[in-house]
Amino acid sequence: MTKDEIWMQRALDLAKLGEGRVAPNPLVGCVIVQDDIVIGEGYHAQFGGPHAEVNAFQSLKQSAKWATVYVTLEPCSHFGKTPPCADLLIREQVRRVVICNVDPNPMVAGKGIQRLLQAGIEVDVAILEQAGAEINQNFFHYHMKNRPWITLKFAASADGFIADESGAPVHFSNEISKQLVHKLRTQHQAILIGVNTAETDNPKLDARFWPGNNPIRIVLDPTNRMRQDRTLLQDEFALLICTKDHAHVDGNKQWIALGDDLLAGLMKYCQKEGIQSILVEGGTKTLEAFYAAGLADTIVQIQSKVSLKKGIKSPFQDLSWELMEQVGPDNRWLSAKENLS
């Protein structure tokens, strides 16, 4: 690796420390180097909090004049919750800024780089570009494809059943895979189920087994039939219920009318509201609906050693899984990514 790649890898490692806490902002890390020595570093740790560059400069114990700054995403050039980071770099009189990825957000999209160049700062771009795009796949996908990154997740028996014959849920996960699922929840801005899952499983849809933010909770309920005694409607947390034609608000529970094509309406709603990623944990019907609509970027299956012999068939039985990992003695974690449909 070159020196630039070494310091950028450090910035990427720092960026990942903000995982689960910064959405809808991207993960960003920053390293300040002078005479081949790191003199400051930081990362974006919390949505609404200081950006990576600000935290890096606040860590300094000396001047960064003529230093090189490594940052995983183009410094912002606009006022949001914090002032522009490009202005900070100019004010600190750094010599060079090395950037992993250009920011796809139209509010930035090269404007930060332009401002740095106009101030006489040397700028290099696309150092470890692929690695940077991977850690911010949700953010990049949302801004480039105009819809959220969507992960479909389900658990199934060894012989391919998602539930017993009555539709009652079967607990396939072990303690390790349960924690990994909750980690997956913190990595997505929203979590979605269908009304049948809400009725039969009565879930909480939180991330209590992993540190990070709880996702926005969404239920697809076309005819508004979910029972009022369900936990999702009775607890103190916000809930979004997507219907065809029913709309009202009751405290932090909101029903929105999306028309006959719920998924198309939901994509428009997410684009408008800035929801960049959704973890779909519904039953077979909901999962297959997303897949058939071309709305599947990753599919994850927790496969148990348990065999049911009969029941409700799991979806995607002919899918070629790209990754298979053993999770404890009785679970496997299977995943396939992109170009699925």
Image (cartoon, helix red, strand yellow):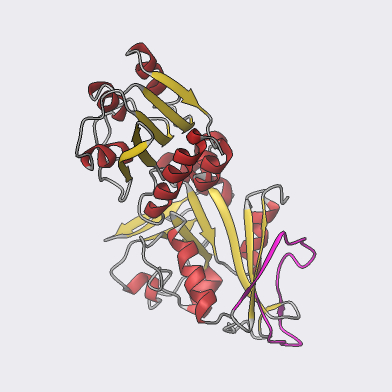
Near-viewer residue (43 or 107): 43
- The residue at the point 46 percent across, 51 percent down is 257
- Based on the picture, tell me whether residue 57 belongs to the magenta stretch: no
Please name the residue shown 53% across and 79% down the image: 200
Q: Position of residue 7 (x, y in %)?
A: 44, 39
Instruction: Tell which of 1 and 264 is nearer to you.
Output: 1
Instruction: Answer yes or no: is residue 103 visible.
Output: no
Write down the quadrant of residue 332 in the picture.
bottom right
Whether 308 is among the magenta residues is yes
Judged left or right of residue 116, residue 144 is: right
Q: Percent position (x, y) of residue 150?
A: 56, 52
Please tell me how many numbered marks the rendered image carries.
0
- Is 30 in front, or is 213? 30
The image shows residue 93, relative to residue 82, as above or below, that is above
Instruction: Give, as a single range, the part of the protein colored magenta.
Output: 303-327
Residue 82 at what x, y percent from top left? Answer: 24, 35
Q: Residue at x 53, y 45 (%)?
A: 137
Q: Is residue 268 above or below residue 162?
A: above
The quarter of the picture where residue 42 lies is top left
Q: Is there any visible trace of residue 92 in the rendered image?
A: yes
Q: Is residue 182 left or right of residue 286?
A: left
